[in-house]
Image (cartoon, rainbow, N blue to C red):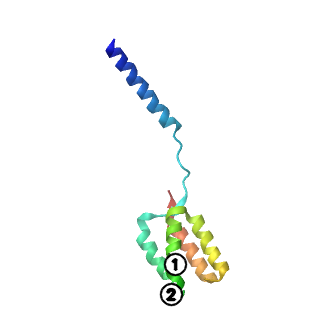
Amino acid sequence: MNKLLRVRDMKRQQNDRRDFHERREFPKREKKLDMRRSEEFGYMLGKAVEGLPDSVRGAIRGSIYSLASKKGIKEAKEFIGKKYQEGVIDYDTQKKLINLIYDYSKYR
């Protein structure tokens, strides 16, 4: 009798586990910075913002890096567009930065 209860409990646990895996929803994959190439991206990002004044260079570089790696490429692109509209960066720098984040991104 006791052995029968243990077997029944084991089957119930297996069914609960199976139900959990079937119900689990995976988050939607987004295009973000490829972290395997993050050092190379950081170097190229530094080269792309080289012509900017020292007062804004570090802030823009850090913001683009963090947005691209944590939130996604879309948010980083919006940030770059906002900085272009504010007049902080010029059109050529905007294009370089947008191309750079697309080159160093992947879905994750």
The residue sitting at 32% across, 16% down in the picture is: 3
The residue sitting at 52% across, 67% down in the picture is: 68
Q: Amino acid at mark 2?
A: Asp
Asked if 89 appears above or below 71 in the picture, the reply is below
Please give the residue where the numbered disc 2 appears in the rendered image.
54
Secondary structure of residue under mark 2: helix
- Quadrant in which the N terminus appears: top left
- The outermost residue toward the left is 3
Image position, residue 8 (x, y; %)? 40, 19
Q: Residues within 10 Å of mark 1 (few under 14, many from 20)?
A: few
Q: Residues within 10 Å of mark 2 (few under 14, many from 20)?
A: few
Image position, residue 67 (x, y; %)? 53, 67
Q: Which mark is residue 59?
A: 1
The residue sitting at 58% across, 81% down in the picture is: 93
Q: Which mark is residue 68?
A: none
Asked if 5 appears above or below 96 in the picture, the reply is above
Question: How far apart, in angstroms, are the residues tagged by discs 2 and 1?
Answer: 9 Å
Q: Amino acid at mark 1?
A: Ala
- Name the N-terminal-most of marks 2 and 1: 2
Image position, residue 95 (x, y; %)? 60, 77
- Between residues 1 and 70, which one lies in front from this camera angle? 1
